[in-house]
Image: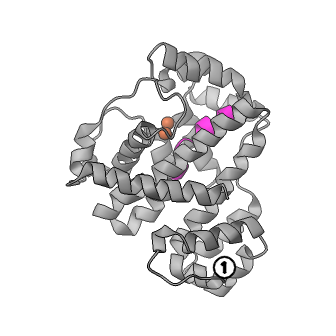
Amino acid sequence: MQDQVQEFVKNANHIPSIPSQMTHLLQTISSPNSSTAEIGKLIIPDATLSARILRLANSAFYFRMAPVTRINDALTRLGFKTTRSMVVTVWTQSMKAFTNNKTEADAVSHMLNHGTACAVIAKALMDRINRPIAEDVFLAALLHDMGRLAITSQLGKQYMDDVLSFAEQSNRDTSSVEEQVLGFNHSMLGAHLMQSWHLPTLFKDIAQDHHKQTLAPENNPALASVIIADLWATEMGYNVALNSYRQKREELVDFFKISDINQFKEDCKNKITTMIEILNS
Ligand SMILES: [Fe+2]
Ligand SMILES: [Fe+2]
């Protein structure tokens, strides 16, 4: 199946890639020697990004604080890692430009909201057990279905009819239908993209394994958090092919020892709504 992934990428003309300006910005944010002023200088020329970062810093996430109006103050409040998450989240929205009509645009929009919702939920789960990597997991969750976005950018309606709708009608999971129709699945393509974008191994592993059917959560809590996030985001309506088959994963949920799951989901839902509002503003 790897050969089919290579072949698909080789022949595709709409495969998303990270622009070099953004790579530079991400490198600057990730460098321990960078200052807020240096990062601010790279963000300020991008009006959309600046506006969204300011809105996030002034949003309900930080509601107890006084409003900020300058990017550098927003960066100090958010911290470099959250700023990095926001930069990538804003960039993913540019994939809406690859669509040819409203049906495709709606599907891509649902997929992007799915990524945002998964990112928020996976981070909230990881915050409970391993705060230092929670922001990395946010990003890996944001990008976990990048393979599916790439297939949609390339095949559009054909993918939506032959895979997504067919999976719903036949109560099958989308990955097995993809394998039957395309010869590979979106997890494999996603893993390939994470590697070709030189992102850390965590991103590749999560893109590759987020539909893995058996997992001992203590061996890979980050993956467990994304698998749960994938299911809960879908349950909240943030996904496409909402009625395709999905395996329940209660054994993974127990690992995170959440005393009030409904309240936890409610809190996540509020954060997701805020984040999506900011991204669409
Ligand atoms: Fe997936
Ligand atoms: Fe997903």
For image coordinates 46% across by 64% down, the residue present is 135
Comparing 234 with 8, the one in front is 234
**Magenta residues?**
142-152
For image coordinates 71% across by 74% down, the residue present is 43
- The image position of residue 203, as x and y in percent, is 50, 52
User: Is residue 199 among what the camera can see?
Assistant: no
According to the picture, the residue beneath numbered tag 1 turns out to be 39
Q: Is residue 43 left or right of residue 178?
A: right
For image coordinates 65% across by 66% down, the residue present is 52
Position of residue 148 relative to residue 204, above or below, is above
Q: Is residue 147 magenta?
A: yes
Q: Is residue 276 magenta?
A: no
Which residue in the rendered view is the most extreme toward the top? 170
- The image position of residue 105, as x and y in percent, is 71, 37
Dot 1 falls on a residue whose secondary structure is: helix
For image coordinates 55% across by 42% down, the residue present is 191
Label 1: how many Cα within 10 Å (few below 14, some 14–19, many 20+): many
